[in-house]
Image: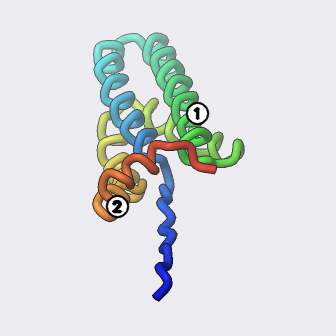
Amino acid sequence: MAQTEINKEIKTYLFHPTAVIILILLDWGGFLFEVPQIISPLTLIFTFLVIFLISFFLIFILQQHFAGDSKKDAIIKGLLGGLICAVPAPVMASFIGSIILALSGFENIKQFGMEGIKRMFSKQE
């Protein structure tokens, strides 16, 4: 009897898990900086822009490198993640981020164990 190899593809969905973790951390970290600045609208806008740019850049890079997304898809996901992080409310990334996290491929760890982790964080071609 010939041994057949089953090729199970490990995929991530909407966002790569690392991008979702970055999204949640930046949103909560940004919220800590935004709360004292509610008095001054200019610093609030500046903080909004800085958090948006940092999260956009990080998510764009992670989506291109780990998830293997095209440049266009990575830009769209970076913009979406940047907006979620930049909104001055921790609920955005914690609630929405939790939904995205559930849809981001962490089931690979449950299904494939350590091999799922290795393949999930290796560059996708």
Relative depth, front residue between 16 and 114: 114
Residue at the far bottom in the pictured view: 1
Dot 1: few (<14), some (14–19), or many (≥20) neighbours within 10 Å? Answer: some
Element type where label 2 sits in the image? helix
Quadrant in the rendering for residue 20: top left
Q: Residue shown at 32%/64% (left/top)?
A: 111
Q: Position of residue 102 (x, y in %)?
A: 34, 57
The residue under label 2 is which amino acid type?
Phe
Q: Where is residue 93 in the image (x, y as percent from the top left)?
A: 36, 41
Tell me which label, 2 or 1, sits earlier in the chain.
Answer: 1
Dot 2: few (<14), some (14–19), or many (≥20) neighbours within 10 Å? Answer: some
Left or right, residue 9 beside residue 116:
right
Q: Residue shown at 65%/40% (left/top)?
A: 75
Left or right, residue 65 beside residue 81:
right
Element type where label 1 sits in the image? helix
- List the residue tagged with mark 1: 61
The residue under label 1 is which amino acid type?
Ile
Give the total number of marks visible in the rendering.
2
Q: Where is residue 59 in the image (x, y as percent from the top left)?
A: 52, 36
Q: Where is residue 33 in the image (x, y as percent from the top left)?
A: 33, 16
Q: Residue shown at 52%/29% (left/top)?
A: 58
- List the residue tagged with mark 2: 112
